[in-house]
Amino acid sequence: MIDLSVFGIPKITGVLHLGSNSGQELEYYKWMGINTRIWVDPFHEVAGERCLPYAVGSHKPHLYIASNNGESGSFLKPKMHVAKYPHITFKRVETCRLRWTKVTTIIALHVPTEVNLMVLDLQGMELEALRTCSKFYFNVFDYIVTEAYTEELYEGNGYLHEIEEHLKDHYKLVKFIPEADKGWGYAYFERIK
């Protein structure tokens, strides 16, 4: 679960959460007073919440379902994740019935103006998802919090430096909080004004 308080984000008025799983952050978002919440996950629903049933990025033929309630599940093949988290196992399945979309499409069709934070929790697909967002739509969000990688936990995952490079014309990296010796962490970006 992402603890947004560690980043010191000034004022969150709404959140677009990509990769919501079962909405573990729901009560936390409510506690923070974030009343506009849009969840995106192709497999899970968030009780009583608006959840869009999309996979974000370009079509992938397989999904690797994780044994930890799907929290580590990814469209990318696990690599170092297996060594870092040996208690989590994966099962490969076909993804032929999923609805794939771009971040730009989600924003254009489903995101109201009060949403100023985008959270990406996509198990290695964060950079790919960001690449599906046209530069015009980057001005929608004041803040981005994303999982980012310092090691290849999933085959082809986006590294922190790649995400930072991709966002550099619109956002600056404010803080990166690594998970101790796990090869990933949470990165917080603020829009350059």
Image (cartoon, rainbow, N blue to C red):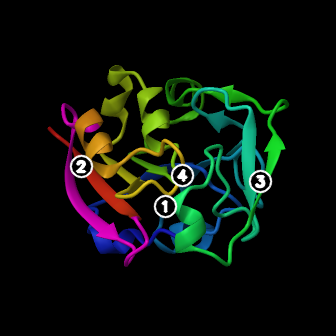
Q: Residue 154 carries which label?
A: 4
Of the image marks 2 and 3, the number of the one nearer the N terminus: 3
- Residue at image point 47% right, 68% down: 2
Q: How crowded is mark 1: few (under 14 residues within 10 Å), some or many (20 or more)?
A: some
Instruction: Answer whether labels 3 and 4 touch (C-beta < 8 Å).
Output: no
Instruction: Answer whether labels 2 and 4 touch (C-beta < 8 Å).
Output: no
Alpha-carbon span between mark 3 and mark 4:
21 Å
Residue 38 in the figure: left or right of residue 107: right
The residue labelled by disc 2 is 190
Q: How crowded is mark 4: few (under 14 residues within 10 Å), some or many (20 or more)?
A: many
| Quarter of the C terminus within the rendering | top left
Alpha-carbon span between mark 1 and mark 3:
21 Å
Quarter of image, res 183: bottom left
Alpha-carbon span between mark 2 and mark 3:
29 Å
Seen from the viewer's position, the closer of residues 3 and 59 is 59
The residue labelled by disc 3 is 44
Q: Note whether residue 54 is visible.
A: yes
Residue type at numbered disc 1:
Ile
Q: Residue 34 carries which label?
A: 1
